Amino acid sequence: MFNLRPVKLADAEDLFRLSQFYVFISLPSDKAIITKKIKSSIQAFKKSSKDLSEDTFIFVLEDLSKGKVIGCSMIHAQHGTEEEPHFYLTVSQENKFSESINTGFIHGTLKLGYDTDGPTEIGGLILDPNYRNNNQKLGKQISFVRFLYMALNQKKFKSTIHSELMPPFDKDGHSPLWEAIGRRFLNMDYQDADLLSRSNKEFILSLYPSDTIYETLLPLEARNAIGKVGKDTLPVKRMLESIGFKYTKEVDPFDGGPHYRAKLTEIEPVKNLFSGPIHFNKELDKKDCSNFLVSADEQKEFCAIRVVGKIEKGKFLTSQEELQDYNLTEKCIINAIPL
Protein backbone atom coordinates (compact mmCIF):
# COMPACT_ATOMS: atom_id res chain seq x y z
CA MET A 1 0.00 0.00 0.00
CA PHE A 2 1.16 3.50 -0.80
CA ASN A 3 0.16 6.89 0.54
CA LEU A 4 0.84 10.45 -0.68
CA ARG A 5 1.05 13.20 1.93
CA PRO A 6 2.90 16.36 3.00
CA VAL A 7 6.41 15.81 4.32
CA LYS A 8 7.07 15.48 8.08
CA LEU A 9 10.21 16.05 10.15
CA ALA A 10 10.42 12.30 10.70
CA ASP A 11 11.00 11.90 6.95
CA ALA A 12 14.34 13.73 6.99
CA GLU A 13 16.49 10.58 6.97
CA ASP A 14 14.50 9.02 4.12
CA LEU A 15 14.74 12.22 2.05
CA PHE A 16 18.49 12.35 2.65
CA ARG A 17 18.71 8.77 1.34
CA LEU A 18 16.69 9.74 -1.75
CA SER A 19 18.87 12.81 -2.34
CA GLN A 20 21.86 10.54 -2.95
CA PHE A 21 20.23 8.88 -5.97
CA TYR A 22 20.22 12.10 -8.03
CA VAL A 23 21.93 15.50 -8.19
CA PHE A 24 19.14 18.01 -7.53
CA ILE A 25 19.44 21.64 -6.49
CA SER A 26 15.97 21.33 -4.90
CA LEU A 27 17.03 18.36 -2.73
CA PRO A 28 20.76 18.50 -2.01
CA SER A 29 22.52 15.73 -0.08
CA ASP A 30 22.77 17.88 3.03
CA LYS A 31 20.78 16.89 6.14
CA ALA A 32 20.72 20.43 7.55
CA ILE A 33 19.34 21.92 4.31
CA ILE A 34 16.81 19.08 3.95
CA THR A 35 15.58 19.62 7.53
CA LYS A 36 15.24 23.36 6.87
CA LYS A 37 13.23 22.67 3.71
CA ILE A 38 10.96 20.26 5.59
CA LYS A 39 10.23 22.86 8.29
CA SER A 40 9.46 25.44 5.59
CA SER A 41 7.10 23.01 3.87
CA ILE A 42 5.27 22.20 7.10
CA GLN A 43 4.68 25.92 7.62
CA ALA A 44 3.47 26.40 4.03
CA PHE A 45 0.89 23.62 4.38
CA LYS A 46 -0.20 24.98 7.75
CA LYS A 47 -0.57 28.62 6.64
CA SER A 48 0.49 30.18 3.35
CA SER A 49 2.69 33.27 3.43
CA LYS A 50 1.58 36.57 1.93
CA ASP A 51 4.84 36.37 -0.01
CA LEU A 52 4.33 33.36 -2.28
CA SER A 53 8.05 33.03 -2.91
CA GLU A 54 8.48 31.86 0.69
CA ASP A 55 6.20 28.85 0.23
CA THR A 56 7.58 25.49 -0.88
CA PHE A 57 5.35 22.44 -0.60
CA ILE A 58 7.02 19.01 -0.36
CA PHE A 59 4.97 15.87 -0.99
CA VAL A 60 6.20 12.36 -0.18
CA LEU A 61 5.22 8.91 -1.39
CA GLU A 62 5.22 6.42 1.47
CA ASP A 63 5.41 2.65 1.26
CA LEU A 64 3.11 1.82 4.18
CA SER A 65 4.12 -1.84 4.23
CA LYS A 66 7.75 -0.87 4.94
CA GLY A 67 7.13 2.41 6.76
CA LYS A 68 9.48 4.44 4.59
CA VAL A 69 9.37 7.31 2.12
CA ILE A 70 10.29 6.19 -1.40
CA GLY A 71 9.64 9.35 -3.43
CA CYS A 72 9.00 13.07 -3.28
CA SER A 73 7.94 16.04 -5.37
CA MET A 74 7.71 19.78 -4.77
CA ILE A 75 5.88 22.99 -5.61
CA HIS A 76 7.55 26.39 -5.20
CA ALA A 77 4.65 28.84 -5.10
CA GLN A 78 6.68 31.58 -6.84
CA HIS A 79 9.98 31.19 -8.65
CA GLY A 80 11.48 34.60 -9.48
CA THR A 81 11.45 37.76 -7.35
CA GLU A 82 13.28 41.10 -7.18
CA GLU A 83 15.73 39.58 -4.68
CA GLU A 84 16.12 36.26 -6.54
CA PRO A 85 15.20 36.61 -10.23
CA HIS A 86 14.34 33.66 -12.43
CA PHE A 87 17.10 33.53 -15.08
CA TYR A 88 16.80 31.93 -18.50
CA LEU A 89 18.22 31.96 -22.02
CA THR A 90 15.80 32.80 -24.82
CA VAL A 91 16.35 30.45 -27.77
CA SER A 92 15.81 32.23 -31.07
CA GLN A 93 17.14 32.65 -34.61
CA GLU A 94 18.77 35.42 -36.59
CA ASN A 95 18.85 35.58 -40.38
CA LYS A 96 21.99 36.83 -42.12
CA PHE A 97 22.11 37.46 -45.87
CA SER A 98 24.57 39.05 -48.29
CA GLU A 99 23.11 40.23 -51.61
CA SER A 100 26.55 40.77 -53.13
CA ILE A 101 27.54 37.11 -52.83
CA ASN A 102 23.96 35.79 -52.71
CA THR A 103 24.62 33.83 -49.55
CA GLY A 104 22.62 33.60 -46.34
CA PHE A 105 22.62 31.79 -43.03
CA ILE A 106 20.15 31.20 -40.20
CA HIS A 107 21.94 31.31 -36.86
CA GLY A 108 20.58 29.94 -33.62
CA THR A 109 20.92 32.50 -30.83
CA LEU A 110 20.81 32.61 -27.03
CA LYS A 111 20.06 35.71 -24.98
CA LEU A 112 20.07 36.04 -21.18
CA GLY A 113 16.82 37.22 -19.62
CA TYR A 114 15.28 37.28 -16.16
CA ASP A 115 11.88 37.55 -14.46
CA THR A 116 11.27 39.25 -11.10
CA ASP A 117 7.59 38.27 -10.86
CA GLY A 118 7.86 34.63 -11.74
CA PRO A 119 5.39 31.75 -11.96
CA THR A 120 4.77 28.78 -9.68
CA GLU A 121 7.37 26.08 -10.27
CA ILE A 122 7.00 22.31 -9.96
CA GLY A 123 10.11 20.21 -9.49
CA GLY A 124 12.06 17.98 -7.14
CA LEU A 125 10.53 14.78 -8.53
CA ILE A 126 12.41 11.77 -7.17
CA LEU A 127 11.48 8.08 -7.01
CA ASP A 128 13.60 5.37 -5.43
CA PRO A 129 15.03 3.43 -8.43
CA ASN A 130 13.97 0.16 -6.79
CA TYR A 131 10.32 1.19 -7.27
CA ARG A 132 10.50 2.10 -10.95
CA ASN A 133 8.23 0.31 -13.43
CA ASN A 134 5.77 -0.55 -10.64
CA ASN A 135 2.32 -1.45 -11.97
CA GLN A 136 0.76 1.17 -9.68
CA LYS A 137 2.34 4.04 -11.63
CA LEU A 138 4.21 5.35 -8.58
CA GLY A 139 6.18 7.95 -10.55
CA LYS A 140 2.98 9.36 -11.98
CA GLN A 141 1.34 9.35 -8.55
CA ILE A 142 4.08 11.44 -6.91
CA SER A 143 4.03 13.80 -9.89
CA PHE A 144 0.24 14.20 -10.13
CA VAL A 145 -0.33 14.74 -6.41
CA ARG A 146 0.92 18.28 -7.00
CA PHE A 147 -1.80 18.93 -9.58
CA LEU A 148 -4.47 17.55 -7.25
CA TYR A 149 -3.30 19.86 -4.46
CA MET A 150 -3.07 22.89 -6.76
CA ALA A 151 -6.54 22.18 -8.17
CA LEU A 152 -7.94 22.28 -4.63
CA ASN A 153 -5.89 25.31 -3.49
CA GLN A 154 -5.56 27.58 -6.53
CA LYS A 155 -5.29 30.79 -4.49
CA LYS A 156 -1.97 29.60 -3.04
CA PHE A 157 -0.32 29.60 -6.47
CA LYS A 158 0.32 31.76 -9.53
CA SER A 159 -1.80 31.39 -12.65
CA THR A 160 1.14 29.98 -14.65
CA ILE A 161 2.95 26.74 -13.74
CA HIS A 162 6.59 26.34 -14.72
CA SER A 163 8.84 23.28 -14.97
CA GLU A 164 12.58 23.03 -15.70
CA LEU A 165 13.79 19.73 -17.13
CA MET A 166 17.20 18.13 -16.85
CA PRO A 167 19.31 18.15 -20.06
CA PRO A 168 21.65 15.41 -21.26
CA PHE A 169 25.08 15.31 -19.60
CA ASP A 170 28.24 13.80 -21.06
CA LYS A 171 29.73 10.45 -19.98
CA ASP A 172 31.65 12.19 -17.17
CA GLY A 173 28.53 13.89 -15.82
CA HIS A 174 29.45 17.33 -17.18
CA SER A 175 27.07 19.80 -18.82
CA PRO A 176 28.29 20.54 -22.38
CA LEU A 177 26.66 24.01 -22.38
CA TRP A 178 28.22 24.89 -19.03
CA GLU A 179 31.66 23.87 -20.25
CA ALA A 180 31.18 26.01 -23.38
CA ILE A 181 29.85 29.17 -21.70
CA GLY A 182 29.45 29.07 -17.93
CA ARG A 183 32.91 27.89 -16.99
CA ARG A 184 34.56 30.48 -19.27
CA PHE A 185 32.70 33.42 -17.77
CA LEU A 186 32.10 32.34 -14.17
CA ASN A 187 35.29 30.31 -13.63
CA MET A 188 33.75 27.58 -11.46
CA ASP A 189 32.41 24.06 -11.72
CA TYR A 190 28.78 23.47 -12.72
CA GLN A 191 27.93 21.95 -9.33
CA ASP A 192 29.52 24.86 -7.45
CA ALA A 193 27.64 27.43 -9.52
CA ASP A 194 24.39 25.48 -9.08
CA LEU A 195 24.95 25.39 -5.32
CA LEU A 196 25.84 29.10 -5.12
CA SER A 197 22.78 30.09 -7.15
CA ARG A 198 20.60 28.66 -4.36
CA SER A 199 21.45 31.66 -2.17
CA ASN A 200 23.08 34.19 -4.52
CA LYS A 201 22.02 35.04 -8.06
CA GLU A 202 23.85 38.39 -8.35
CA PHE A 203 26.91 36.69 -9.83
CA ILE A 204 24.85 35.44 -12.80
CA LEU A 205 23.75 38.94 -13.83
CA SER A 206 27.22 40.37 -13.20
CA LEU A 207 29.36 37.75 -14.95
CA TYR A 208 27.23 35.86 -17.48
CA PRO A 209 27.42 37.29 -21.04
CA SER A 210 24.54 39.71 -21.60
CA ASP A 211 24.88 40.09 -25.38
CA THR A 212 23.55 37.68 -28.01
CA ILE A 213 25.36 34.32 -28.04
CA TYR A 214 25.54 32.66 -31.46
CA GLU A 215 25.15 28.89 -31.25
CA THR A 216 27.42 28.55 -34.31
CA LEU A 217 30.36 29.54 -32.12
CA LEU A 218 29.66 26.77 -29.59
CA PRO A 219 30.99 23.20 -29.76
CA LEU A 220 28.63 20.70 -31.38
CA GLU A 221 28.05 18.90 -28.04
CA ALA A 222 26.86 22.16 -26.46
CA ARG A 223 24.59 23.02 -29.40
CA ASN A 224 23.02 19.57 -29.27
CA ALA A 225 22.23 19.93 -25.54
CA ILE A 226 20.20 23.15 -25.87
CA GLY A 227 16.53 22.51 -25.19
CA LYS A 228 17.04 18.75 -25.02
CA VAL A 229 16.39 16.38 -22.12
CA GLY A 230 18.38 13.45 -20.78
CA LYS A 231 17.24 9.85 -21.24
CA ASP A 232 15.89 9.60 -17.67
CA THR A 233 13.90 12.80 -18.14
CA LEU A 234 12.16 11.79 -21.37
CA PRO A 235 9.15 10.24 -19.55
CA VAL A 236 8.68 13.48 -17.58
CA LYS A 237 8.79 15.53 -20.78
CA ARG A 238 6.20 13.30 -22.46
CA MET A 239 3.96 13.42 -19.40
CA LEU A 240 4.07 17.23 -19.21
CA GLU A 241 3.31 17.57 -22.91
CA SER A 242 0.40 15.13 -22.62
CA ILE A 243 -1.34 17.27 -19.97
CA GLY A 244 -0.92 20.67 -21.62
CA PHE A 245 2.61 21.94 -20.92
CA LYS A 246 4.52 23.51 -23.81
CA TYR A 247 8.17 24.32 -24.44
CA THR A 248 8.69 28.07 -23.94
CA LYS A 249 11.75 28.45 -26.20
CA GLU A 250 13.67 29.23 -23.02
CA VAL A 251 16.37 27.13 -21.36
CA ASP A 252 18.45 27.07 -18.20
CA PRO A 253 21.49 29.39 -18.58
CA PHE A 254 23.75 26.85 -16.86
CA ASP A 255 22.94 23.59 -18.61
CA GLY A 256 20.48 24.36 -21.43
CA GLY A 257 17.66 22.24 -19.98
CA PRO A 258 14.26 23.23 -21.50
CA HIS A 259 11.58 25.21 -19.66
CA TYR A 260 7.94 24.12 -19.95
CA ARG A 261 4.82 26.06 -18.90
CA ALA A 262 1.04 25.83 -18.76
CA LYS A 263 -1.81 27.87 -17.32
CA LEU A 264 -2.93 26.24 -14.06
CA THR A 265 -6.59 26.11 -15.12
CA GLU A 266 -5.66 24.51 -18.47
CA ILE A 267 -3.62 21.58 -17.09
CA GLU A 268 -5.61 18.42 -17.87
CA PRO A 269 -5.73 16.93 -14.32
CA VAL A 270 -6.82 20.32 -12.94
CA LYS A 271 -9.49 20.73 -15.63
CA ASN A 272 -10.75 17.21 -14.97
CA LEU A 273 -11.00 17.49 -11.17
CA PHE A 274 -14.05 15.63 -9.84
CA SER A 275 -15.59 16.41 -6.45
CA GLY A 276 -18.48 14.29 -5.26
CA PRO A 277 -19.62 11.30 -3.16
CA ILE A 278 -18.22 7.78 -3.20
CA HIS A 279 -20.58 4.95 -4.11
CA PHE A 280 -19.56 1.32 -3.62
CA ASN A 281 -20.63 -0.97 -6.45
CA LYS A 282 -20.17 -4.71 -5.86
CA GLU A 283 -20.75 -5.50 -9.53
CA LEU A 284 -18.25 -2.95 -10.84
CA ASP A 285 -16.19 -4.35 -13.72
CA LYS A 286 -12.61 -3.13 -13.37
CA LYS A 287 -12.18 -3.42 -17.13
CA ASP A 288 -14.47 -0.39 -17.40
CA CYS A 289 -12.53 1.55 -14.74
CA SER A 290 -9.48 3.83 -14.68
CA ASN A 291 -6.83 4.89 -12.19
CA PHE A 292 -7.56 8.01 -10.15
CA LEU A 293 -5.69 9.95 -7.50
CA VAL A 294 -8.15 10.56 -4.67
CA SER A 295 -8.27 12.72 -1.53
CA ALA A 296 -11.17 13.14 0.88
CA ASP A 297 -12.74 16.29 2.34
CA GLU A 298 -13.20 14.50 5.68
CA GLN A 299 -9.45 14.21 6.26
CA LYS A 300 -7.93 16.76 8.64
CA GLU A 301 -4.73 16.92 6.61
CA PHE A 302 -4.28 16.54 2.87
CA CYS A 303 -3.32 13.08 1.67
CA ALA A 304 -4.06 11.08 -1.44
CA ILE A 305 -4.18 7.49 -2.68
CA ARG A 306 -4.54 5.69 -6.00
CA VAL A 307 -8.02 4.24 -6.50
CA VAL A 308 -9.47 2.21 -9.37
CA GLY A 309 -12.96 3.42 -10.25
CA LYS A 310 -15.07 5.48 -12.62
CA ILE A 311 -17.19 8.62 -12.54
CA GLU A 312 -20.84 8.15 -13.37
CA LYS A 313 -23.93 10.34 -12.79
CA GLY A 314 -22.14 12.64 -10.35
CA LYS A 315 -20.73 9.82 -8.23
CA PHE A 316 -17.35 8.15 -7.93
CA LEU A 317 -17.97 4.43 -8.34
CA THR A 318 -15.47 1.99 -6.85
CA SER A 319 -15.32 -1.25 -4.85
CA GLN A 320 -15.22 -1.33 -1.06
CA GLU A 321 -12.00 -3.35 -1.20
CA GLU A 322 -10.21 -0.42 -2.85
CA LEU A 323 -10.72 1.75 0.23
CA GLN A 324 -10.93 -0.73 3.11
CA ASP A 325 -7.55 0.34 4.54
CA TYR A 326 -8.19 4.10 4.35
CA ASN A 327 -11.31 4.70 6.49
CA LEU A 328 -13.26 6.17 3.58
CA THR A 329 -16.91 5.18 3.71
CA GLU A 330 -19.76 5.39 1.23
CA LYS A 331 -21.08 8.93 0.63
CA CYS A 332 -17.78 10.52 1.73
CA ILE A 333 -17.04 13.52 -0.49
CA ILE A 334 -13.84 12.92 -2.40
CA ASN A 335 -11.73 14.85 -4.90
CA ALA A 336 -10.30 12.87 -7.79
CA ILE A 337 -8.12 13.43 -10.84
CA PRO A 338 -7.39 10.82 -13.53
CA LEU A 339 -3.94 9.22 -13.57
Image (cartoon, rainbow, N blue to C red):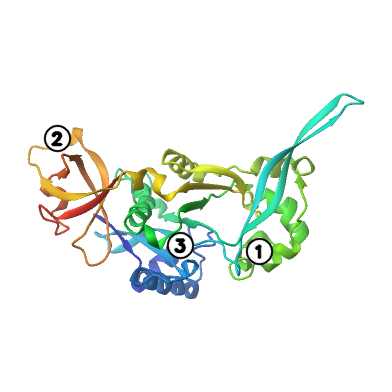
Mark 1 vs mark 2: which is more N-terminal? 1
Spot occupied by residue 231 in the image (x, y as percentages of width and height): 53, 42
Say which residue appears at 42% left-offset and 50% top-offset: 264
Secondary element under disc 1, as helix, strand or loop, is helix
Residue type, label 2: Asp
Q: Residue at x 46, y 62 (%)?
A: 77
- The quarter of the rendered structure image containing the C terminus is top left
Image check: 37 left or right of 317? right
Identify the element where label 2 is drawn.
loop
Say if mark 3 contacts mark 1, CB within 8 Å.
Answer: no
Residue type, mark 3 in image: Ala
Residue 77, label in figure: 3
Q: As drawn, is 51 to the left or to the right of 269?
A: right
Callout 3 crowding tier (Cα within 10 Å): few <14, some 14–19, many ≥20: many
Q: CA distance from mark 1 to mark 2?
A: 54 Å
Q: Which quarter of the image is occupied by the N terminus?
A: bottom left
Where is residue 208, by image quadrant?
Answer: bottom right
Tag 1 residue: 193
Q: In the rendered view, does 117 fall on the left or right side of 279?
A: right
Most distant residue in the left direction = 282
Amino acid found under the numbered disc labelled 1: Ala
Residue located beneath label 2 in the image: 285
Secondary structure beneath label 3: loop
Q: State yes or no: discs 1 and 2 in contact (Cβ < 8 Å).
A: no
Q: Nearer the viewer, mark 3 or mark 1?
A: 3
Residue 104, percent from left and from top: 82, 29
Per the rendering, the mark at residue 265 is none
